[in-house]
Amino acid sequence: MARKTPEQLQKIKEKHNVSQLYSWSKYNCYASDPYTYYLKYIKKIPEDRNDSIYGISGGYAHTILEKLYGNEIKYEDMINEYENALLDFYMSNLKYDRFNEEKNLLIAQKYEYCLKHFFKNHQQIKNKVLLEQFVLIWIGKFLFQGYIDFLHKEDDCYIITDWKTSSIYEGDKILKECGQLLLYAESLLQKGIPIENIKIRWAFLKYVTVENELANKNKNTRNISRDGIGKSLYLSLIHI
């Protein structure tokens, strides 16, 4: 779905009698760092650098998945798309660590192996998928807008997925980062979908979930970095 134009957003504001539409990114920026909000959204000062390879690589990974589920490319084309993007990154001199070349190479080897493994082994969702679904959410007297990256339905359950190329969230990081997903879940609630029929989740591309059956017949589920699958499973076997 194409992004709303300024004219379309203005009509939405008029329809709902509000002077402003809020977004999660703006709200979160203000809540996390009001001074950065002031510089970015009030003074509109450009960032010193906006060429982080993590941000660009993550954005392109999203694009590849959108192309797959938008029927623009075939499954087997994903790895070629990613490897072509890597070539562009290298030609643009993008780095994972600009101050330590040895560390940069080690990070690149791990990070890129994990994403290549994902694009070769992704278990494609066969149900109909809605991409970039525009939603409006009332939070008190404030009207938020947003775009759900990836929404599909399994039986009676609506599943919102946020693809991530970052390290997996653990502990307090989960609570810190879940706000946008909760906001999007609220948009479905306000459409009349029961809360028990809504599932929100992150899909961390660098990791795979494995399940081991222990000697006592209990099951152990773990998230393993894709570059360490073999070693991790071997260690699991020798400790059973």
Image: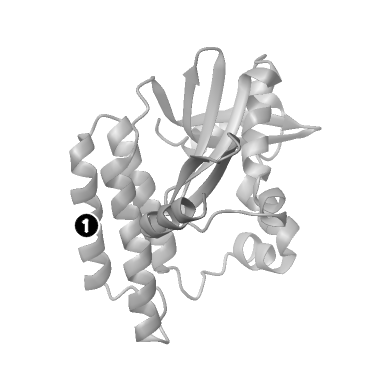
**Residue shown at 19% from the left, 57% from the top:** 84
Figure check: 106 above or below 168: below
Relative image position of residue 43 (x, y in whole percent): 63, 66
Examine the rendering and report whether any part of residue 165 can be seen.
no
**Residue shown at 47% from the left, 43% from the top:** 210
Quarter of the picture containing the N terminus is top left
Under mark 1, the amino acid is Glu
The residue lying toward the viewer, choosing from 148 and 111, is 111
Figure check: 179 above or below 60: above
Residue 72 vs residue 126: left or right?
A: left
The residue labelled by disc 1 is: 83
Residue 172 occupies which quadrant of the picture?
Answer: bottom right
Examine the rendering and report whether any part of residue 229 can be seen.
yes
Instruction: Name the outermost residue toward the right.
Output: 140
**Residue shown at 48% from the left, 28% from the top:** 151
Relative image position of residue 57 (x, y in whole percent): 36, 59
Residue 206 vs residue 219: left or right?
A: left
SS state under label 1: helix
Figure check: 84 above or below 134: below
Relative image position of residue 219 (x, y in whole percent): 57, 37
**Residue shown at 71% from the left, 69% from the top:** 35
Relative image position of residue 161 (x, y in whole percent): 51, 35
Residue 142 vs residue 25: left or right?
A: right
Residue 148 vs residue 97: left or right?
A: right
Q: Dot 1 surroundings within 10 Å: few (below 14), some, or many (20 or more)? A: some
